[in-house]
Structures are given as C-alpha cells and as structure tokens.
Image: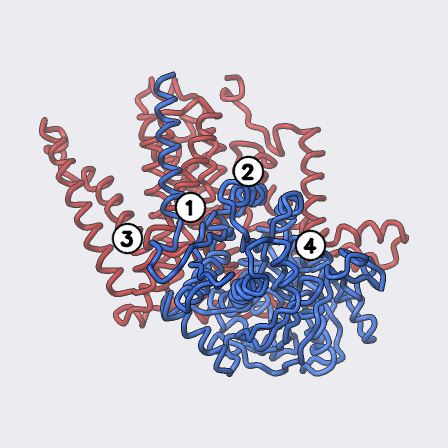
Amino acid sequence: MRISRRILAGLATASLAVTATSCGGGGTSGSFDDTVTVGILHSLSGTMAISESTLVDTEKMAIEEINASGGVKVGGKSYKIEYIVEDGASDWPTFAEKSKKLIDQDGVPVVFGGWTSASRKAMLPVYESKDAFLYYPIQYEAQECSNNIFYTGATPNQQSEPATDFMYKRSPAAGGDFFLVGSDYVFPRTSNTITKAQVKQLGGKVVGEDYLPLGNTEVAPIISKIKKALPEGGIIINTLNGDQNVAFFKQIQDAGITPSSGYYVMNYSIAEEEISTIGPEFLEGHYGAWNYMMSIDTPASKKFAKSFKKRWGADRVVADPQESAYNMVYLWKQAVEDAGTFDDNAVREALVGQKFDAPQGPVEVMPNHHLSQTVRIGEINAEGGFTILEETGVVLPQAWNQKHPSSKGFACDWTDPSKGEKYKL
Amino acid sequence: MELLLDSLFNGVAIGSVLLVAALGLAIVFGLMGVINLAHGELMMLGAYTTYVTQLIFKLPILKPFYNSYIIVSIFLAFIVSGVVGILLEKTIIRKLYGSPLETLLATWGVSLILQQFVRSVPLAYGTGLVISLLIGLFLPSTFPYKIKESINFKYFKFSSWIFAALTGVLSGSLISSSVSKLSRASARNVDVTAPSWMRGQVEIIGTTFPKTRLMIIIITLISVIAITLFLNQSAWGMRIRAVTQNRKMSDCLGISTEKVDIITFGIGSGLAGVAGVAVSLLGSVGPNVGGNYIVGCFMVVVLGGVGNLLGTVLASFGIGIMTDLIGAGRLLSIWPDMPLPLSNTINFFATTSMARVMIFALIVIFLQFKPTGLFPQKGRMVEN
C-alpha cells in the first residue's frame, strides 16, 4: 500500500513538473501592467503530432510578436500574453478533457486548438456547455456553425469549389471525367458529396469514387479502378490524409498515372509541408488549392515565412494551416482590444467584422464566425512549392454548403438573435 | 484473358505484401507460439534501415553503387531486425514462455518503446546502437574455444561489450557527421525512393505491371523458398521442428532448446525486417508503418493454420485475390449483365473500405467452420 502511494506521489510530482515546464512565456518584464494566460491545445504526441506541432510553433511565434510590440492593450493597461500548452495526444476524448482543464482549472479566456474534425467534434460540447471560446484553424468540411467556435480555416466553397471549377474548365484535363479518392472519414466524404453535386451542375461526370480506410496503404484496387474508369486520362480529386498520400503517389506513378499521360490530381490536403515529405518528384505537375501558399509574392507573406524560419530554423516551411493559426491569434488580440475586456461574450461580439492584413491578403470575420478569404490554385513544381496559377477575389465563407443536399438554402448568423446557428435563407 | 491476368497479378501483388509481412510472424507465432505484437515495429526497423542505407549510398564513396542499395538493404534489414529480435528474446520473451497474455502485454509495450525510439533518437545514433548490439552479442561467440571455456570468460565478454559500445558510438558519430539528415531526431515520416531501374512499369503479354510490385513479389518468393529450405533441409531447421513438436523430448535428446529459441526468434524477426524493405517501396516510412500491418499478419497466420507455412502462403494469396476481386469490382466486368440486385450489391462492396469489411466477414464465417484454419497443426503439440 505504502509503495503504491509513493508511486502515486511520484507520478503527481512528475506531472506537475511537466505542467510547470509546459507553461511558457517566461517571467513578466517590467513594461507590462499585467499578464493574461491563453490556452494552446494541439497534439504533441501520437500520429497527429507532426502536423499539429507546426501550429503550436506558429501560435507561439504570433504571441511572441504581439508581446514584442507591447502586448494586448485593454482598458488603458497593457497585458503580456502567456500561454499554457496542453497535449491532445491525437486522442479525441483527451481534447475534451484538456479543454475542461484549461477552462475550469486555468481559467483561460480563449483556447487555440484542434486539427482533425474528430477532435473539434469532441471539444464542441465542452465549449458550448461552459460558454467558452475555441479558435480552430483548419480548412474543414463545414456543415457546422457554433456560437462558441471561431473557424479561421477554409470552408468547402473557399477551397474545393473553386478548385473543381478550375479543373473542369481551365486545367489541361478540362472537360474530362472525375474520379474521387479519399481517406475514409468525415472530411473526404462530405467534401466529395459537394464535389459530386458541383460536377453535375457543371455538366461533367464523376465516373468513380473510392475511400481508403485510415492507416491502409494498399492502393492497388484503386489504381485498377482508376485505369478502368479513366482509360484516357482525366481529373482525380484527392482528399487522402497524411501518409496515405505517399503510398498513393508512389504507386500511381509506377502504374503510369501521371500528368504526362493525361491524369491530373487536384489535392485538398497537400501543402508545402506534405510536399517535402512525399517528395516533389512524385507530385510535380499536379495541383493544390489553398488560401495561403508560401510562394505568394507579397511583403506580408514573405515577412511571415521569414520570421517563422528565423524563429524555428531555416529548413522549416509555412503552409496554409499555419497561416490560419497565425491569423487567429491576431484576430483575437484585435477583438479583445476593441471589446476592452477579456470577457467572452463581449469579445465574441467585437470579433465579427474584425479585419486583418493576413499573409494571404486581407481577411474579415463574418457573422457566421468564419473568415472571408482569397482562394488560390497552384501547380506543384520541382522545388517543392506551388506555382500560383489563379487567384480569386475575396470569397465569403458558407458554414452551410449551398451545394450539399442537406444544407442547401441555409445559413448561419450569430449577430442576429433571430437567425443563429442555422436559418433558412 | 488480359482481365484475368491483370486481376491475378493484382491479387498476387496484394497477397505478397501480406505474405512477406506475415512470414516472420508465421515462424514466431506459428512455431514458437509467441504472440509478438512488436512484429510490426520490427518491420518498421527494416523500413528505416532501407532509408538509412539509401542515404549512406548517396555518400560520394558509395555513389557508384547507388543503384544496388535496395539489394544491400534487404540483407542489412534482416540483420538489424534480427539482432533487435534476439535482444528482445533474451531480455523479455524468454522469461514469458507459456504465458501468452503477459507476452502480449510485454511485446505491446516494446512496440510503443520502439516507436518512440525512432521518433526521439537521431537515426545515426540508432544505427550506432544496433552496431554495438551486433558486436556485443556476437563477438564473444567468435572467440576460440580455449577462451570460451576459461574461467575468466565473463571478463572477455565484458570487455567485448565495452569494445562494442565504443564502436557503436564512433560509427554513430561518423554517420551523423557525414549524413546531416540522420543527425537530428525527427518524428516526420521519411521517404524511400526506389532506384531508377525499379521505377516505372514493364509490359508482359500486353498488360503493364509496376516494377516495384514485381520486386516485392520476387523478395517474397525468395524469402519463402529460403525459409522452407532452411526449415526442411538444414540441421538447425530440423532442430527447430523437433522443438516445435515436443520441447521436452528434444531437450532430453540433447538439443539446446535455448539456442533453438534464439535462432527461431531471430529468423522470424529478421524476416520482419525484410518485409520492412518491401513496404518502404510502397509508402512512406514512419514510426507507425508496421503497426498498420499487424492485424493483417495475424489474420493471415490464423487463417492459414497456426504453424503451417503453406497455409500462410495460400491464405495471403487468397486474401489478396479476394481483395482485388471485391474491391475493384472485377465480377462486374467478368459478368456484365448480371441481375440488378446482385450487381448493386457488388457495387456496394466495390470500395476499398467495404471490401475490407467483406473480407473480414468471410474470414469470420470461415473460422466458424474451421476454427483451426486451412491446415490445422497435427501431432503432439495439439495434444498439449
């Protein structure tokens, strides 16, 4: 009995030590009147750690930048931002649990966190029941609009719809048939439902669709189906996740499914980070669609990439999810300063209408808690980046997709109490 | 004809990946009865060995031989995974023979340790560690008989471990200073690029086949033939079979069962390493690469009948061909005008994820009727 108690005590001290070291920010310097502590909640271990840790790095950088320029100014006082980083461990219930801890125990006014839709769905009830506020930075399938979440990633109409349009009308495979490939979970299936409706509207044809179970890398049956459905080449829309892309591109290249033989793949989950992992030699000539691409030639974009490299190493890259994460920290700061308080309800009200000169160009918070953004179509080049081919104007976010049969004709507006989460247009 | 050939090739290609992954397990689980959940991680070590070999062959001295790195890495992967397997047997599994549940938990723990190991230790030092393990484990056995029998042998053994550690550290730092990619730990998945002669496709009787797939089929074939010859023709193979059939009697007859266990486990683990080379050609190499195959491996071994290599071979090709038939909707092209309800059903299952569901369902049904698999083990072991 005594031993087990001792072990328990040891574990407790160990976990305390971990929490203590995970508190960042350092000591308060003299120039600030006070401090405010925010929560950062991403996976630092497990399968998602590779992707999500880049967001933690970006959010830390944004906070450091804000602190360096005088912190958050509320009611005539300047606050230094400190942060508590929690590990979601690639495990969705852990995200909910850690959210509770951040809100109840640490009393943070805001949590920046999440990557997968599964983690967001797990956290949503926590934030709604405690009326707290989560900022979520990833491009996702939409069909959700919570008063307690602020979404800075793209909705399908800000990524997949312009991309499908480009592929069908202006790509080298214009007018060709579509084949849809994705990992088997909610984002690819929802995204492909929208794509199918859109292709039908455009007058095109979807000749096949297949989903690979997560973790499975056997794509031989998919390749034979693609070859059967698109014997002369065509358009492939790819929503595969993570490593499955490596298996897919390695094997389709070996099977002769390449741009030179008339097959063009449009990718929704491959950004600069993934290109360097997969290898540009497998991806060259295929396409991607994002709001932010590292090759954007504006001072704001270059500054963002440069400061990230300076802070975290010259071999690091920035990509769309990181840009979203960067924007949300700044938008929160602006909203807090406008509201004049850290109180959630006031900040939420002040948030809508916030404008920010983001690395991708100007963005604005819409009444549905999503961002208006610019959409870019790029061709993957041999250097591992995108050659930007097209750039839309500012596209307004649709929380409820207008092409998806279940949400057509609905919208979301949190500024008008009579409308709310889902109202008929 | 072309369709049939295509389907057969695809089935064999999928099956051979399963087979090469399950072959080591068929030995460890089938012959020794050890439920080794770290089997996938031994594969992962093989895949990382391929990656390290590839980078080392990019060094100026070895550059002219770059095209052959994949052949070299097959042998290296066998050795690396084999050595780690032997260490695993000597330290953990040996104490747990006869208690499957504890073995299962212990090897699962080992699998987590190995995954975290490749995430947080620079690969160069990982290589150094494997080199020192290799020397430490095998150097003492090369000493002349006189020294081995002497009373001071433990000192010799100890000093050989010191030598091994030094060599390991030295080679680790040598690699880390010459290949910068290996000098830092990274949880990021890495990529093995097949040499140019293995990329693209070949044409056989009017249809085209990817070369990497052919390579995997060849690796698998050679492994199966080699292991069958070893088990059936060599003296140690005979001893392994003897111990499998009746451990106590073999012990009485003077077979060192301890040595047999080490060799069997070492070979099983080494084969996992070879499988790692094969899967590195198909996808990316990461800490979780082996874990994705572990369920499939057990499935194949159980379906084939525990302890029977031929069963494992037939089961993996069977599953491969079924996966292709169902997943790619082949039946529809063989019989295009089948009745509507039937074709709708087939279409429903003609996606990769539904095909998997179907395969698992079929296996469950099959095992209801033949719980011991295709070729159940006969002989004394069954009676125990």
Please give left or right for residue A195 compared with residue B296 in the image.
right
Badge 2 amino acid: Phe
Q: Residue at x 38, y 32 (%)?
A: A11
Mark 3 lies on a secondary structure that is helix
User: Is the residue under label 4 in contact with that under label 1 (CB below 8 Å)?
Assistant: no
Dot 1 or dot 2, earlier in sequence: 1
Whether labels 1 and 4 share one chain: no
Please give left or right for residue B362 compared with residue B255 in the image.
right
Q: Is residue B241 above or below residue B163?
A: above
Crowding near the residue tagged with mark 3, few <14, some 14–19, many ≥20 C-alpha atoms within 10 Å: many
Position in image of residue A29 (x %, y %): 33, 59
Between marks 3 and 4 in the image, the one whose residue lies nearer the viewer: 4
The answer for which chain carries disc 4 is A
Dot 2 or dot 3, earlier in sequence: 3
Closer-to-camera residue (A203/A412)? A412
Measure the alpha-carbon separation of dots 3 and 4: 50 Å
- Of the 4 image quadrants, the one containing the C terminus of chain A is bottom right
Q: Quadrant of residue A167?
A: bottom right
Label ID, residue B115: 1
Badge 4 amino acid: Asn
Q: For mark 3, what is the residue?
A: B125
Measure the alpha-carbon separation of dots 1 and 2: 20 Å
Measure the alpha-carbon separation of dots 3 and 1: 15 Å
Q: Which chain is red?
A: B
User: Is the residue under label 1 in contact with that under label 3 (CB below 8 Å)?
Assistant: no
Badge 3 amino acid: Tyr
Q: Is residue B13 visible?
A: no
Q: For mark 2, what is the residue?
A: B298
Q: For mark 4, what is the residue?
A: A147
